[in-house]
Amino acid sequence: MRVTVGTLVGLLASGHSVDRVLALYPYLEREDVLAALSYAAWRVEEVEVPLRAS
């Protein structure tokens, strides 16, 4: 029974509270939700990539 980071972020983004997410997935702990948010933030960090001249 795995819950993806995308699922957790989607629930939070749509207005669900962390407590509601924990009620929906009682086998998760608050730290799991916070770790998912931290991971998602890390994954979307902007990276500057130099562009080649055409």
Image (cartoon, helix red, strand yellow):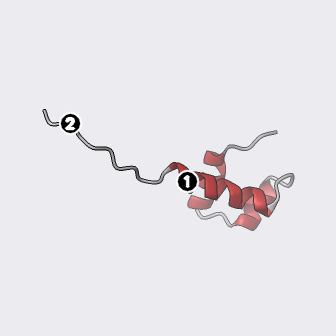
Of badges 1 and 2, nearer the viewer stands 2
Q: Quadrant of residue 23?
A: bottom right
- Side (left or right) of 14 relative to 31: left
Question: Quick one: label 1, few (<14), some, or many (20+) residues within 10 Å?
Answer: few
Q: Give the amino acid type for the residue marked by disc 2 in the picture.
A: Arg
Secondary element type, mark 2: loop
Q: Could you tell me which residue is drawn at 82 percent across and 54 percent down?
A: 28
Residue that extends furthest to the right in the rendered view of this protein: 27
- Side (left or right) of 17 relative to 15: right
Q: Give the amino acid type for the residue marked by disc 1 in the picture.
A: Trp
User: Which of pointers 1 and 2 lies earlier in the amino acid sequence?
Assistant: 1
Residue on which disc 2 sits: 52
Residue 9 lies, with reference to residue 50, above or below; the image says below
Secondary element type, mark 1: helix
| Depth order, front residue of 4/19 | 4
Q: Is residue 11 visible?
A: no
| Depth order, front residue of 53/15 | 53
Residue 20 lies, with reference to residue 50, above or below; the image says below
Residue on which disc 1 sits: 42
- Side (left or right) of 23 relative to 12: right
